[in-house]
Amino acid sequence: DAVLNASNGHRNKALNDEAFGLAGLIHYGEFSEADIQRDLAAAAVANGMERSEISLTLKSAISNGKDSPRVISESQQRGKPAAPMQRPDGAAQDAAGGLGKAKATKDMSEAIWRGCKPANMNQDYIKRKLGLPDGLREDADKNLIVPAYTIDGEMAFVQTITKTGKLFPKGSMPSSTPGACFVVGGQLQDGETIFIVEGLGHGWSVHQATRKPAAVCLGVGRVAGVAKALREAYPKARLIIVADIGQEPQMEAVARSIGGLWVELPADLGEKGDVNDLFQRDGLQAVADLLASPRQVSWRYKLQTPADLAALEPVRYRI
C-alpha cells in the first residue's frame, strides 16, 4: 500500500524503503527476493513509475537490505508492529547496526591497505586494461587493491581484483557507505566535468581520453548512490554517467535523478561491452570523440518553452 499510494515526488522513496525493509527479512524464509521484486514492481507500475527507475531502485535497495538483516523479536512475531523501516543512506541506520558495520568495514579495509605495497605498471590487471597505478596497491599475491573513499576523504572499503574476478573482503559491507568511490584523475571540483563509471578499467579509459576525473563506483549497484553523493557535494558540476552495453535504461534513470548527462556506447561492442573495450579496440581518440557529445536524458513529458505556451489554445472556463 505504501508504494501504491505514494504521491508524486515520494514514490521512489516509498519503493526504496519498502524493498530495503523487506529484503532485511529474507533470512526468515517467509518470502524470497523474487517475491519482493514481483510485488513491489507491480505496485510501482500501477502508481505510474517508469520501469527503468523501478528496476534500478529495487536492485540497489534489495542488495542493501540483504546486507543489513533485520531482527524481529518474539513479541513482534506474535503480532506487535515491527520498528519502522530505515533508509540505507546513513540518515538513519537500522537496528542491525549499520554504523557499526561501516566502521568495521573501514577498520578491516585500512588493515588490508597497510599490508600492501604501491602498485606499478607491471601489475597484471593494470597491464591488461592499459591502466594507471596511481593511488592503488597490490597484495602479496599480486592482486590489485582498490580503495573507496567517502566524499570527506575517509577510506570506506577496498575492492580486490584477482585474475578471476572482483571481490570485497569477507565480512565487509560496502553498501553501508553508498556514496564512496575511487577517483581516477585528480581532485574533483564543483563547476567542472566529472564522469561517473562502474569499474576501474572504465575510469582509466575515460580519464586518459578526456583528462577529466572519473568517479569509479566499483559496482553497477553502487552507481546511483555515488551519483547522488556527488550531486549533493558538487551541485554545479557537470556530471556525466558512462553506461555499459545493456545498462542504458538504468544509467539514464540515474542521470535523470541527478540532473546529469549520460553516454551510450556503440552497440557493436557486443553484450556487456564497456568503454575500456572501446579504448582497446578503437583507441583513445574514439573514446574522446564519444565522450565529447553526451546525451540529454529523455523526459516523459516535453518541457514547454515560453513560445510553446504562447502558442497554446486559450483555456476557457464555464462557471
Image (spheres, helix red, strand yellow):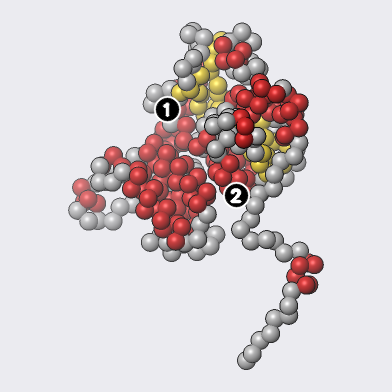
Q: Residue at x 46, y 35 (%)?
A: 175
In the image, taking residue 141 as reference, residue 309 lies left or right, namely: right
Kindly tell me whether residue 293 is visible in this rendering. yes
In the image, taking residue 198 as reference, residue 39 lies left or right, namely: left
Asked which quadrant contains residue 233, the reply is: top right
Q: Report the front residue among 106 and 168.
A: 168
Q: Secondary structure at mark 1?
A: loop
10 Å crowding of disc 1: few (<14), some (14-19), many (20+): many
Q: Residue at x 68, y 28 (%)?
A: 206
Q: Residue at x 28, y 56 (%)?
A: 81
Q: Report the front residue among 288 and 64.
A: 288
Across and down, in percent, residue 155 comes to 55, 27
Circle 2: residue type: Ser
Circle 1: residue type: Ser
Query: Which quadrant of the rendered structure holds the N terminus?
Result: bottom left
Q: Residue at x 55, y 21 (%)?
A: 146
In the image, taking residue 318 as reference, residue 22 lies left or right, namely: left
Cα separation between marks 1 and 2: 28 Å
Across and down, in percent, residue 246 comes to 55, 37
Across and down, in percent, residue 49 comes to 51, 57
Kindly tell me whether residue 151 is visible in this rendering. no
Give the residue pinned by disc 1.
Answer: 172
Give the residue pinned by disc 2.
Answer: 257
Query: Which quadrant of the rendered structure holds the C terminus?
Result: bottom right
Residue 256 badge: none
